[in-house]
Image (cartoon, helix red, strand yellow):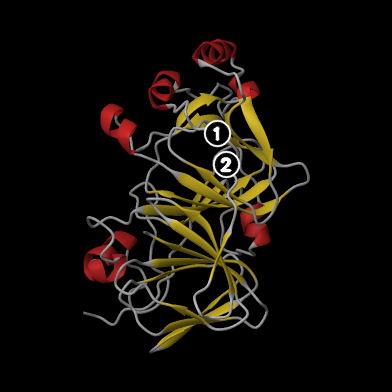
Amino acid sequence: MMNMYPVKLSPVYKDYLWGGDRIPRVFKREHAPGGLIAESWEVSDRSDGMGVVTNGALAGKSFADLIQLWGRNLLGARVAGDRFPLLIKLIDARERLSVQVHPNDETAAKYGGEAKTECWYILEADSGAGVYAGFKPGVDAAAYAAAVAQGATGNLLNHIPVQAGDAVFIPGGLVHAIDAGCLILEVQQNSNTTYRIDDWGRVGADGQPRALHVQQAAQVIRWDITGDPRVTPRALSDGSGNLRHRLVESPFFLLDRIDLQRPQQIDGRDESFIALFIASGTACLEWPGGHEILVSGSSCLVPAALRGALVTSSDRAVMLHVTVP
């Protein structure tokens, strides 16, 4: 087998109508397309947005080809099957996203679609920005049905203020929307199933309202999920001397924030791939046989079986670290 190395993948840009120009502007992406950019799929093994390797000996190979080539050495022993289990993306919410919900594993198996539990790390947030998540106290199925008929379900949702550095956990079944003014890194199950409940009266580029999926949404909503979806970071000690916090711990992914003050070992120990995203600053990822400079906004995928990888930073970069449990 060809020597493994950390791979960088080409971003796959999506031009949904609520997007803006923040992703290429903030992260200085000179080769991004013009026009609206709502999402940048950073690590994607999907036919509707397949990543392509941009560095090293396998540059030009699709991510799916890379998985076939490196298999368990890339994905790790914890990943079942031969598909990358996550989708990692940037989201620029210049306008509010629709009120929506996704199935979880149970309802996807029962009603169809792909399960999607997700989390958001807030990279930037305008003054007053927030997210919508979960129904206000006292909202029941009857109030929900009446609001759907009136096109006013957004009024039933909790609006939660957010700021840079916050993390929000959205399990499948929780009704939600991202408010305008947020730049977000999203980590989610590998899914593109979204049931749109309300689009705030918006019309698409053709002047017509976008399709709603009210019936499908009703089948997958979980009424038992309540409370603030923002998570409280938990300090971890890994012996590196860096400030490390567990932001999200779910059955599908683990998200850590590492403030790089000292060298940080990156080792999946054959158990899990490690996806890295540089939220701010600049880092250098070194391994036996090579190195990559990771600037702010860079994503990189480290194979589970790669040994000896180390990240350093001279300007105290903030790095997000994603694995599977």
Q: Is residue 122 above or below residue 8?
A: above
Q: Quadrant of residue 32?
A: bottom right
Q: Amino acid at mark 1?
A: His
Q: Secondary structure at mark 2?
A: loop
State the image coordinates of residue 259 (x, y, percent, origin top left): 61, 72
**Alpha-carbon distance for marks 1 and 2?**
10 Å
Q: Is residue 36 above or below residue 132?
A: below
Q: Quadrant of the C terminus?
A: bottom left
Q: Quadrant of residue 108?
A: top left
Residue 200 seen in the figure: no
Label annotation for residue 195: none
Residue 27 seen in the figure: yes
Q: Secondary structure at mark 1?
A: strand
Q: Residues within 10 Å of mark 2 (few under 14, many from 20)?
A: some
Q: Quadrant of residue 149?
A: top right
| Residue drawn 56% across the image and 13% down it | 143
State the image coordinates of residue 295 (x, y, percent, origin top left): 59, 72
State the image coordinates of residue 128 (x, y, percent, origin top left): 77, 41
Numbered label tally: 2
Is residue 262 left or right of 216 when viewed as pictured? right
Residue nearer the viewer, 49 or 240: 240
Q: Amino acid at mark 2?
A: Pro
Q: Which residue is mark 2?
A: 229
Is residue 10 left or right of 181 when viewed as pictured? left
Is residue 234 left or right of 28 when viewed as pictured? left
* Dot 1 and dot 2 residues touching (CB under 8 Å): yes
State the image coordinates of residue 103 (x, y, percent, origin top left): 38, 33
Q: Which residue is mark 1?
A: 176
Residue nearer the viewer, 18 or 70: 70
| Residue drawn 65% across the image and 57% down it | 165
